[in-house]
Amino acid sequence: MQARVAAVRIHAHALAEELPTHQHRQGQLAMVLRGTVTCEVPGALWMAPLHGGFWIPGGVPHSLRVSRGGNVCFLFVEDAAAVMPPTCCALGISPLLRELILRLVVVAGDPQCEPRAQRLHAVLLDELVRMPTEALYLPVSEEPRLRRLLDALMRDPSDRTTAAQWASRLAMSERTLTRLVQLETGMSFGRWSQRLRLIVALQWLTSGLSVQQVANDLGYDSVSAFIAMFRKAMGQPPARYLAQRR
């Protein structure tokens, strides 16, 4: 892509779409229109919620997974085109920015639309640099035993297996497991597993699931327990958090 700004759209139909680890010189914004998108960069896993996105600076190796039935737009931006965050981050997407990106997809590659595309670029970049950022990600490790733990919890985030039980499954002591998680992620086992559930909860809530259903599906004993966890982590209850981002 030679343009200063370019956009493409991907539809994942019957199967999830996997993009193995790669990198490119442009920064990349992944904007989720339907389903979920998971991005892994060295040391971190990002999961973008519906109508939100995440920013990947140019040159950062990353892999992407679009869920089955997912619909996502990728916006590529040259470093010189806009002052964007130098590190990966979750990024708010305003309705205006979303429509500008979708319009750019339509006119891309049509020489007759080049003057129009240039005007779109100017407005789009002006809006893009104003979007709020959020450092909400899951620290991850390439350590094989922790990868098994991560893969299992990603498949079933409601799993309430204790650290002692996980240690037994992974053929190590509980003390070794908790020290390994702290060393590799910078978090305790409890905080790390709760962060994973929080990110999954945000995905599910923004896709339209109710607080009641998300609490049940994540294995909380009550809705109030889930709301208390969410309020402690995000500073406000789920309903208020989502209302401010619509």
Image (cartoon, grey):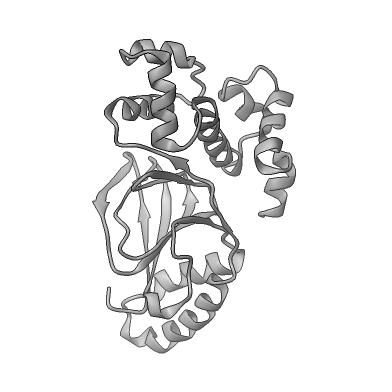
Residue at the location (54% across, 41% down)? 203
At 31% across and 25% down in the image, what residue appears?
145
Q: Quadrant of the N terminus?
A: bottom left
Q: In what quadrant of the picture does the C terminus appear?
A: bottom right
Name, please, the residue furthest toward the bottom: 115
Q: Is residue 228 left or right of residue 60?
A: right
Image position of 223 with respect to 39: above or below:
above
Q: Nearer the viewer, residue 137 or 116?
A: 137
Q: Residue at x 33, y 80 (%)?
A: 110
Is residue 155 something that shows in the picture?
no
Measured as percent of width and height from the top left, residue 155 is found at: 40, 27
Q: Nearer the viewer, residue 18 or 168?
A: 168
Q: Position of residue 170 (x, y in %)?
A: 32, 16
x and y, in percent, of residue 150 in the image: 38, 29
Q: Is residue 69 left or right of residue 219?
A: left
Q: Is residue 241 left or right of residue 101?
A: right
Task: Name the residue located 39 percent from the left edge and 84 percent from the top edge.
Answer: 113
Q: Across the whole image, how many numbered discs are drawn on residues? A: 0
x, y percent for residue 163: 46, 17
